[in-house]
Image (spheres, rainbow, N blue to C red):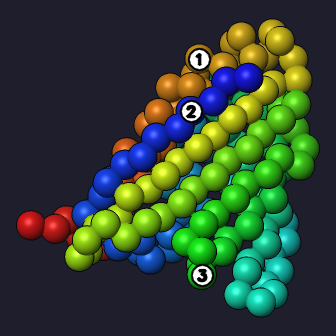
């Protein structure tokens, strides 16, 4: 199963980066290959927010939409994404945000996935792998725009 994991230190607080990643409706503005994202449901309980969202990703003539469940846990500085429906057999995505000194944090990003179709996996797999490697950078650039660049 393809997977990608990285830890990236950024010049923004863990709280700011959590808020940025949690704002899923804005993903089409800056996330690689994300063409659309809509939240179906949003429920809050005991400081945890549970979203069900549809995301459309595309590259050239290829388009796929999938549904995932997103759990936002601000007290734990964690975001967990689980697959619900679409072209994958399996999808798991985790974000962790750890303070790393004044005004900085480390972003821990993990994703593991497998397409249902081997052919789709062969066609989309390389593009997804490249896009996932660019995710951390895309979020860091977005944070620089939203929160400013530290000196």
Which residue is located at x 19 percent, y 65 percent?
Answer: 149
Question: Would residue 32 appear left or right of 71 to someone viewing this image?
Answer: left
Numbered circle sitting on residue 26: none
Residue 134 occupies which quadrant of the picture? top left
Q: Is residue 142 visible?
A: no
Query: Which is more N-terminal, label 2 or label 3?
Result: 2
Q: Quadrant of residue 27?
A: bottom right
Sequence-first disc among 1 and 2: 2
Q: Earlier in the sequence, mark 3 or mark 1?
A: 3
Position of residue 135 relative to residue 58, above or below, is: below
Above-or-below relation of 130 to 71 = above
Mark nearest the camera among 3 and 1 is 3
Q: Quadrant of the C terminus?
A: bottom left
User: How far apart, in angstroms, are the residues tagged by discs 3 and 2?
Assistant: 25 Å
The residue that mark 2 highlights is 4
Residue hosting label 1: 126
Q: Please report the residue visible at 64 percent of the width from the left and 63 percent of the height from the top.
A: 79
Asked which secondary structure carries label 1, the reply is helix
Quarter assignment of residue 43: bottom right
Q: What residue is disc 3 on?
A: 75
Who is closer to the viewer here, 1 or 17?
1
Of the two numbered discs 1 and 2 in the rendering, the one whose residue sits closer to the viewer:
2
Image marks 1 and 2: residues in contact by CB distance under 8 Å: no
58 is higher (above) or lower (below) than 45: above
* Residue for point 69% across, 35% down: 112
């Amino acid at each position: 199963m393809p997977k990608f994991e990285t830890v990236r230190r950024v010049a923004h607080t863990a709280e700011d980066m959590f808020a940025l990643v949690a704002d899923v409706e804005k993903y089409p503005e800056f996330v690689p290959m994300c063409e659309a994202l809509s939240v179906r449901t949003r429920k809050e309980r005991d400081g945890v927010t549970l979203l069900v969202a549809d995301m459309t990703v595309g590259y050239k003539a290829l388009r796929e939409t999938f549904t995932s469940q997103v759990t936002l846990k601000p007290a734990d500085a964690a975001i967990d994404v689980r697959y619900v429906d679409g072209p994958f057999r399996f999808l798991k995505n985790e974000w962790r945000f750890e303070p790393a000194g004044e005004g900085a944090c480390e972003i821990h990003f993990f994703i593991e996935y497998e397409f249902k179709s081997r052919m789709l996996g062969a066609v989309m797999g390389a593009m997804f792998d490249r896009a996932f490697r660019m995710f951390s950078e895309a979020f860091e650039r977005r944070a620089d725009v939203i929160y400013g660049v530290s000196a």
